[in-house]
Amino acid sequence: MPRIDHNKFYYNAYKRYGKTPQALCWKDKHSQKERFLQISKALPKDLSSFSLVDCGCGFGDLYHFLQKRNNLPKHYIGIEEQSLFAKIAQKQTQQKIIVGDFLQTSLPEADFYICSGTLNTLTHFESYLFLTKMAQNATQGVIFNFLSKTDSDHFNALDPKKVKELLAQLRFDIYFYQEGYIQNDCTIAAQPYHQL
């Protein structure tokens, strides 16, 4: 089980901060944007012929980030466990938003699977299970960020070496790895071996 009650955790943050990155438990808008910038570096420069699933889409902020950069995918699907957030995301993006726990929900096939911040509130077992599910449903690649260290009682960190080992077992090759843009944060993008 996760260390925290996700519904209570995020609902309390929303009550305190409203529709802001802080309600999604980002430190601030800048830290959210920095992570999105790393993700965008690993995406094709033209997403218009690709499908993309945004896991833990929150309010649909990644969609708007890509929209501002004129690089929206052909098909965008958000997956969000918090029904209130999913409702806001659907209204703001006018895209398909699936409400559900991605560890339990059947995931659709897509070219790219994106996950920004979601792994930070999962246990190690849940994180590796989730990465496996993403890899099984992504035809072109998976792109995600995670904490490599944390002192928080609310967030979990993953060992980058173990994450890389898991991707190798899943027959995914890492083509983008970045750290240092934010302290203790890593972004990885990997593609199936058949894409090489």
Image: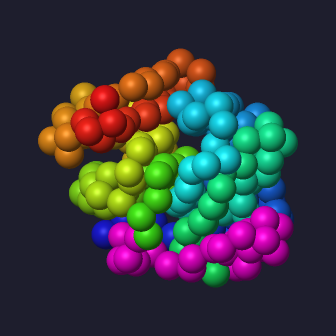
| Residue under the image location 20 percent in, 40 percent down | 171
Q: Is residue 143 visible?
A: yes
Q: Residue furthest top?
A: 180
Coloured how? rainbow
Q: Find out whether residue 93 is within the magenta segment.
A: yes
Q: Quadrant of residue 32?
A: top right
Q: Which span is picked out in magenta?
A: 84-107
Outermost residue, front side: 49
Judging depth in this view, the residue of 51 and 166 nearest the camera is 51
Quarter holding the C terminus is top left
In depth, the one of 191 and 91 nearer the eye is: 191
Q: Is residue 151 left or right of residue 159?
A: right
Q: Position of residue 120 (x, y in %)?
A: 46, 50
- In depth, the one of 120 and 190 nearer the eye is 190
Residue at 64% over, 81% down: 83
Q: Position of residue 41 (x, y in %)?
A: 60, 28
Q: Is residue 182 above or below residue 46?
A: above
Q: Quadrant of residue 151 in the image?
A: top left
Q: Is residue 159 visible?
A: no
Residue 112 drawn above or below residue 18? above
- Residue at the (41%, 43%) spot, across then down: 141
State left or right for residue 131 relative to residue 20: left
In-image side of 120 versus 193 (left or right): right
Residue at the (25%, 36%) spot, across then down: 193
State the image coordinates of residue 77 (x, y, percent, origin top left). Answer: 60, 65
